[in-house]
Image (cartoon, rainbow, N blue to C red):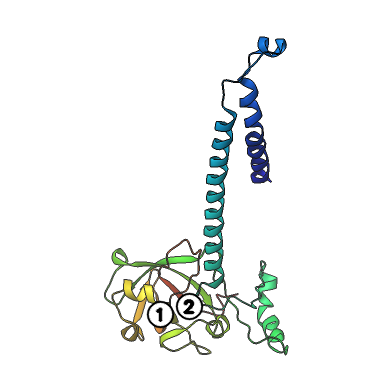
Amino acid sequence: MADTGGIVVVTGLLAGSYPAFYLSAFRAIKVIKGNFTSHVSAAGIRRSLVVFQFALSILLIACIVVIYSQLNYIKNKDLGFNKDQQLIFTFHTDDTRSKMPAFAEGLRKLSGVEGVSMANNYPGAPTYHDWGVWLEGGNPAGSTDQQNLATDEHFVTVMGIRLIAGRDFRAQDSGSVIVNETLVKRLGLTPSSAVGTRLFAGNDRKWVISGVMKDINYTSLRDRVNPFMILYDPRGAM
């Protein structure tokens, strides 16, 4: 609404500028006596306004092209996961979270549902859990910060995330993680060598890399892709 109001105001000012400038050139006494001439060239003002309108039109066309390009980019950008035909249900209380497994099983029985997963977050969420991780023999001082979410063995398939090395989660895959390409590079590894590597974090936490996924845009497209990993933790997903 504010933008619309601003456009109306600017348009009104521009539309009234020509008669205002033209009339301000007349002397009041000569106008009253019926003997007046304008010191301002009407043709010059018209030419100036035509040039201004032409320049404004070019600017507006350029803005439309840029906006269209940005919208087309957002629409067709490969985010690294399947964003279409996805429903996200959020559970905010302990009582509702305790019913998540039964709810998920009920959904899986529906003929129109291709897959169901439980997770404590989702791609595109505003915030994620994050902490530093390091390789065996490393220490917290040299840790690599990463963001993560906890989920079950269905998440990667449901979200259409592509693995480039290793394997997906399996049931009862405790202690396994899937990491993205960026985290692998930050750790000084390759996708093939990363599989089976142990990761460590504070509070004596440790995992084994079971797979490496292609980088996904899990935050805004304005942000670069940072180190990210998916933890197998069905209980933590609730």
Relative image position of residue 195 (x, y in whole percent): 36, 86
Relative image position of residue 69 (x, y in whole percent): 52, 63
Relative image position of residue 175 (x, y in whole percent): 44, 82
Numbered label tally: 2
State which quadrant residue 125 falls in.
bottom right
Identify the residue at horizontal 57%, vertical 49% (top origin): 57
| Residue contact at pointers 2 and 1, CB within 8 angstroms | yes
Classed neighbour count for the residue bearing mark 2: other residues with Cα under 10 Å, few (<14), some (14–19), many (≥20): many
State which quadrant residue 65 falls in.
bottom right
Say above or below: 223 vs 31.
below
Horizontal placement of 33 versus 67: left or right?
A: right
Q: Amino acid at mark 1?
A: Trp
In front of the other: 132 or 124: 124
Say above or below: 193 vs 230.
below
What kind of element bears circle 2? strand
Horizontal placement of 160 versus 181: left or right?
A: right
Distance from disc 2 to disc 1, alpha carbons, whole Å, reads 9 Å
Residue 231 image label: 2
Say above or below: 156 vs 51.
below
What kind of element bears circle 1? strand
Q: Earlier in the sequence, mark 2 or mark 1?
A: 1
In front of the other: 125 or 76: 76
Mark in the foreground, 2 or 1: 2
Q: In the rendered image, which quarter contains the C terminus? A: bottom right
Q: Which residue is mark 1?
A: 207
Relative image position of residue 174 (x, y in whole percent): 48, 84
In front of the other: 141 or 68: 68
State which quadrant residue 131 falls in.
bottom left
In front of the other: 184 or 132: 184
